[in-house]
C-alpha cells in the first residue's frame, strides 16, 4: 500500500490548518506538505536543519541540494520549505484574472493550496527580508501546466512585495552542495561510545595543529591521530568534518573535498579566538 495520501477535500484542508501547517518560524514551523503526503518524482528526504533545529521535508534531490546551499549561506537565518499560498481567495482571483484554470481535486472539486518550495529569511544590513524560491528541473519550464502555476505563484508573491524566483539544476553548484551534504550531519558534535564531548573538542584542537604543520594527506593525519590517542577509527575524520561544517577549516567548497589530497587544499584554519593559524 502506498504511504501517500493523494485525496484532497475540505476536511483535509481544515485538518492541515488545525495542525498548524504552513505556520510558525524556525523550529516551530510546520511545512504544508510532508514527504508522507504526496508522491515525488525525485528523491524525497527528511533532513535536520542547522539553522532551524527541526526536520525539513524535501520532495526532490534538487530541493535538498538547494537547501544545503542555504544552510551554508551566512546571511540566511531561516528556511521554511513547502510554504503555502494560504490566501486561497486571492490565489484563485489571480488565476481568474490571468485566464488560468485554478487546480482542484478531480473528485471533491476542492481547490488545492499551492505551495512555494522555499520561503527564505535573510539578514541584509541588519534587516530581515523574505525571498521565495521555487526549485524545478529545467525541462519542467516547457510544461504549460507548470508555467501556469508559476504565474499564479509569481503574482501572488509580487502582491506581497516578496522577491520570487525559479532555481533550476544549472544554478545549483553540484560539488558545493555535495560537500555541504558530506559534512552536514557533523555540524553538532555528539558523544561517541568511548569519547565524550570534551575530548572531541580537544581532538579538534590537536587536529588543527597537525593539519597546519603537516604536509601529508588529510586522511593520513586523521588516521594517525586516532591511533596516537587510542580512539575508534574515523573519530578524527568525524571531527574534521565538524570543523569544516563550522567553517573553522576553510576549503574551496566548489571543488570536491578529497581527504586523500594534501593539506595544501586547506585555505585557512581558524583558532578558537577567531585568528587564522599559520599554514
Image (cartoon, rainbow, N blue to C red):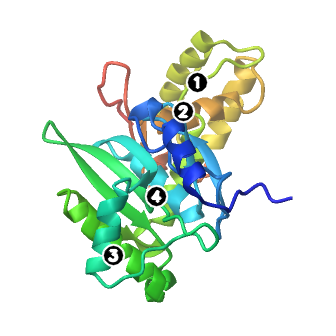
Of marks 4 and 1, the one in the foreground: 4
Instruction: Name the residue tied to disc 2.
Output: 242
Mark before the other along the chain sequence, 4 or 1: 4
Mark before the other along the chain sequence, 3 or 4: 4
Query: Toward the viewer: 186 or 93?
Result: 93
Of marks 3 and 4, the one in the foreground: 3
Query: Separation of disc 3 and disc 2 at Cα?
Result: 47 Å
Vertical placement of 60 versus 209: above or below? below
| Residue at screen point 46% across, 30% down | 27
Q: Position of residue 172 (x, y in %)?
A: 44, 66
- Tell me which corner region of the image, top left, top right, bottom left or bottom right, holds residue 90: bottom left
SS for dot 2: helix
Mark before the other along the chain sequence, 1 or 2: 1
SS for dot 1: loop
Query: Separation of disc 3 and disc 1 at Cα?
Result: 48 Å
Query: Separation of disc 3 and disc 4 at Cα?
Result: 28 Å
Of marks 3 and 1, the one in the foreground: 3
| Residue at screen point 66% across, 26% down | 225
Asked if the residues shown at circle 1 and circle 2 are in contact, with their CB atoms under 8 angstroms apart, the answer is yes
- Residue 189's tag is 1
Asked if the residues shown at circle 3 and circle 1 are in contact, with their CB atoms under 8 angstroms apart, the answer is no
Of marks 3 and 2, the one in the foreground: 3
Residue 159 visible in rendering: yes
Q: Position of residue 130 (x, y in %)?
A: 25, 49
Query: Neighbour class for label 4 at 10 Å: few (<14), some, many (≥20)?
Result: many
Instruction: Name the residue tied to disc 3.
Output: 95
Query: Separation of disc 4 and disc 2 at Cα?
Result: 20 Å
SS for dot 4: helix
Image quarter of the N terminus: bottom right
Residue 248 visible in rendering: no
In the figure, is residue 65 to the left or right of 78? right
Query: Neighbour class for label 1 at 10 Å: few (<14), some, many (≥20)?
Result: some
Amino acid at each position: 500500500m502506498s504511504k501517500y495520501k493523494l485525496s484532497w477535500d475540505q476536511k483535509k484542508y481544515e485538518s492541515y490548518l488545525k495542525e498548524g501547517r504552513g505556520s510558525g518560524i524556525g523550529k516551530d514551523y510546520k511545512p504544508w506538505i510532508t514527504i508522507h503526503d504526496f508522491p515525488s518524482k525525485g528523491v524525497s528526504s527528511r533532513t535536520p536543519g542547522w539553522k532551524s533545529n527541526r526536520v525539513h521535508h524535501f520532495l526532490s534531490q534538487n530541493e535538498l541540494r538547494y537547501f544545503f546551499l542555504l544552510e551554508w549561506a551566512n546571511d540566511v537565518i531561516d528556511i521554511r520549505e513547502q510554504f503555502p499560498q494560504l490566501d486561497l481567495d486571492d490565489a484563485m482571483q489571480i488565476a481568474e484574472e490571468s485566464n488560468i484554470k485554478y487546480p482542484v481535486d478531480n473528485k471533491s472539486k476542492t481547490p488545492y493550496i499551492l505551495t512555494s518550495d522555499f520561503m527564505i529569511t535573510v539578514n541584509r544590513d541588519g534587516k530581515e527580508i523574505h525571498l521565495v524560491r521555487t526549485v524545478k528541473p529545467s525541462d519542467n519550464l516547457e510544461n504549460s501546466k507548470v508555467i501556469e502555476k508559476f504565474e499564479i505563484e509569481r503574482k501572488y508573491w509580487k502582491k506581497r512585495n516578496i522577491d520570487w524566483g525559479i532555481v533550476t539544476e544549472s544554478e545549483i553548484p553540484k560539488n558545493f552542495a555535495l560537500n555541504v551534504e558530506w559534512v552536514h550531519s557533523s555540524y553538532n558534535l555528539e558523544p561517541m561510545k568511548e569519547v565524550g564531548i570534551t575530548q572531541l573538542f580537544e581532538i579538534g584542537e590537536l587536529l588543527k595543529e597537525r593539519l597546519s604543520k603537516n604536509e601529508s594527506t588529510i586522511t593520513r593525519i586523521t588516521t594517525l591521530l586516532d591511533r596516537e590517542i587510542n580512539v575508534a577509527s574515523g573519530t578524527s575524520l568525524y571531527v574534521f568534518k565538524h570543523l569544516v561544517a563550522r567553517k573553522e577549516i576553510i576549503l574551496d567548497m566548489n571543488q570536491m573535498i578529497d581527504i586523500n589530497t594534501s593539506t595544501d587544499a586547506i585555505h585557512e584554519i581558524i583558532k578558537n579566538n577567531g585568528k587564522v593559524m599559520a599554514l
